[in-house]
Amino acid sequence: MIQSRTFGAQASRFLIILVLVLIACLSLAPIINTIMVSVSSSTAVNAGKVYFLPVDINFSSYVKILDDEKFWRAFLVSVERVALGGAINMVLTILMSYPLSRTASQFRARNVYMWIIVFTMLFSGGIVPWYMVISKLGLINSIWALVLPGAVPVFNVILLMNFFKGIPKEMEEAAFIDGAGPLKILWHIFIPVSLPSLATITLFVIVGHWNNFFDGIVLINDSHKIPLQTYLQQLNLTRDQMQNLSVEQLQQYNKISNTTLNSAKILVSMIPILLIYPFLQRYLIHGIVLGSVKE
């Protein structure tokens, strides 16, 4: 690639790099501040002295979160929810997107199902009917209450359906001539070709299940079955919790405030997503490239 060496071109590149660096700094600033708050003393945080450097470094907030059996129990519940709910979401999304990506001549009821899907995107039954249906089905206080109500993410279905539509029909026709049925065509042609789109949807599903805390508050009454985000949402320091503690424990609690504890919550909840993202990143970038050159 030939680059222009004129002063104007170099100045333009410098300004673009400068703007990108400023945007990166603005994006990272809240995260850095959250990290510094989580490892600083409560006195310094409450006094507003913590910005981008820690003050009186201590890890009491992390000790409070990690040195807790309820934390690890809630963590395992969230892992179970992501694994079970993610598998259900992906299977149903694929099985629903494939027939909807066919033409009306191939799937006669396609338009009827599309109207139903669009209707569910525009209108909702409300929280009370939602809770009543789940309660009548006997799902309250179980892992199924966290995964079945959102088993078919409509937005993901539409994304994958549109991606399936872009796959050349000649590939499907060639497989059909060779004797392949719809399921075999889906498994051996559509799914391998759609890996970038599937990776994007998988990331959406994982993040959605991992970050959701509201349904855990409403649908789970047993403290042993709440997911991690619900547990972290409810984790605050109160005077009742500080009664009957030893002197060493009180000294440790004095270093913690709800601000430092909430900052630690945010960082702990980010770690699993940050660990998963690198494995899906190459598929996401590949999907962006495909979309940019697609006719």
Image (tube, rainbow, N blue to C red):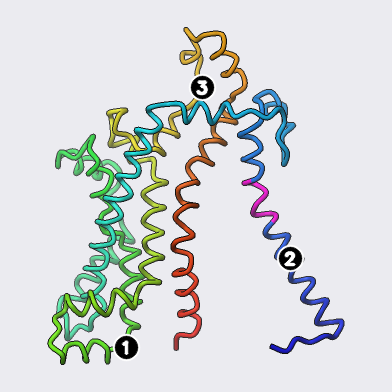
> For this view, does 233 lie left or right of residue 18?
left
Q: Residue tagged by mark 1? A: 168
What residue is rendered at 64% in x and 28% in y? Answer: 58
Mark 1: amino acid: Pro
Mark 2: amino acid: Val
Q: Nearer the viewer, residue 155 or 280?
A: 280
Give the mark nearer the N terminus: 1 vs 2: 2
Q: Compared with residue 76, is residue 245 higher up or lower down, i.e. above or below? A: above
Q: Residue 147's spot in the image, x, y percent?
A: 27, 48
Magenta span: predominant SS is helix
Quadrant containing the C terminus in the rendered view = bottom left
Q: Residue 171's spot in the image, x, y percent?
A: 27, 88
> For this view, does 210 lie left or right of residue 14?
left
Mark 3: amino acid: Leu
What residue is rendered at 31% in x and 78% in y? Answer: 164
Q: Give the range drawn in magenta.
A: 25-31
Q: Quadrant of residue 44?
A: top right
Secondary structure of the residue carrying numbered label 2: helix
Secondary structure of the residue carrying numbered label 1: loop
Give the mark nearer the N terminus: 3 vs 2: 2
Q: Residue tagged by mark 2? A: 19
What residue is rendered at 47% in x and 42% in y? Answer: 269
Q: Residue tagged by mark 3? A: 237
